[in-house]
Amino acid sequence: MQDTNKFKLGLFVTISLFVFIAAVLSMGVFDSLFKSRAHMATFVEESVQGLNSGSAVKFRGVPIGSISDITIIMESRTVRIDMEIDLSKFKTTLGKNIFTTPSIPAPEFYKYLHSEIDKGLCCRIEPDGITGIKYIEMDFFKDVDARHAGPEFQPGLRNGIFFMPSTPSLMSSLRFNMTEILANIATIDFRKISEETISLLERANKTLNDPRLDNLLNDAETILKKASETVETLNGTLTPEKLDLTLAELDKTIRSIRLLSDGLEKTLATSKIPQTTASIRELSDSFSTGDSSIKMTILKLNEALDAMTDLIQYINDNPSSVLHGKGRAKQ
């Protein structure tokens, strides 16, 4: 009887131990102990309301780990967020069977992070629905500038922890932009703008009520009427037939000009302008060389003309000398 009780007790303890092991396995305790993990941290300069230890960490929407701790850095007034990453979520190759493909080792994972930071990989706090719960999202945010708390927190691996850059969340950016917009609006002098607007309207009203403006408008209306009448007169005068005749005469004139131009070109082509120019040049040279002889000839010709003038004057005074010759007249 006593041996039977011992057997039942041993069986109960054995079954209880198997149940305990199954429960532990179902809760993933052993998985958390034996899985390959990486440690990361990032710094943010905004409120982490809704973010707690155990909150999810996602890579492009895929859960890859959880937040292990959240602390405050008093010197830089930033918040440090430590994360544990399950490396089994990262595979080095595609593989036919993803369950048998080995996960990436921690050193290679850190090397991968370092190379992807230059492409825009950083952390950002994101809301998880409308419940107010938040999580850390790792993604390539190329349209925003990645930030970190200071030079001592530059991205990289230090003391077994890889420090990631962060970028402000959408709500933080919106809050910052709204604050900046309100600050810019506060600097606007609305009173001065209102006074200048009223002054401008008064001057515009005074200008519009000026009698000279009415006279100017009347003159403009008169000019427009005259222009309209002129256009109507031109429309009545320049009929399509007259326009066709004018264009025909213009075409005829252009043809005549073209024929005249062709004739001039032919005349210039057939003329001996170079030879004539050469002859004129030779004649000019001969004139220049015979300048002294020409002067002598002109002097002699002048003397001959003077003698002839005297002879004609003498014959005019003494007509009888033509018969008797030149000499003393008989008494």
Image (cartoon, helix red, strand yellow):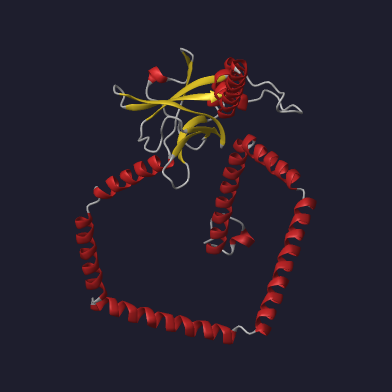
Image: 68 above or below 244 = above
Q: Position of residue 302 (x, y in %)?
A: 57, 48
Which residue occupies 24% across, 62% down?
Answer: 197
Which residue occupies 61% across, 27% down?
Answer: 89
Image: 146 above or below 126 = above
Front in this rendered view, residue 48 or 251: 48
Front in this rendered view, residue 180 or 169: 169
Work out whether residue 233 can be spotted.
yes
Q: Quadrant of residue 284?
A: top right
In the rendered structure, the answer to whether residue 144 lies left or right of residue 192 reads right
Front in this rendered view, residue 15 or 59: 15
Which residue occupies 35% across, 35% down?
Answer: 47
- Specify the farthest residue to the front: 1
Q: How many numbered discs? A: 0
Q: Position of residue 30 (x, y in %)?
A: 57, 21
In the rendered structure, the answer to whether residue 317 lies left or right of residue 223 reads right
Image quadrant in which the N terminus is located:
top right
- Specify the farthest residue to the top: 159
Which residue occupies 73% across, 47% down?
Answer: 273
Image: 12 above or below 323 = above
Q: Where is residue 285 in the image (x, y as percent from the top left)?
A: 66, 37
Q: Position of residue 297 (x, y in %)?
A: 62, 42
Front in this rendered view, residue 77 or 84: 84
In the rendered structure, the answer to whether residue 51 lies left or right of residue 8 reads left
Q: Quadrant of residue 153?
A: top left
- Specify the farthest residue to the bottom: 236
Work out whether residue 111 can be spotted.
no
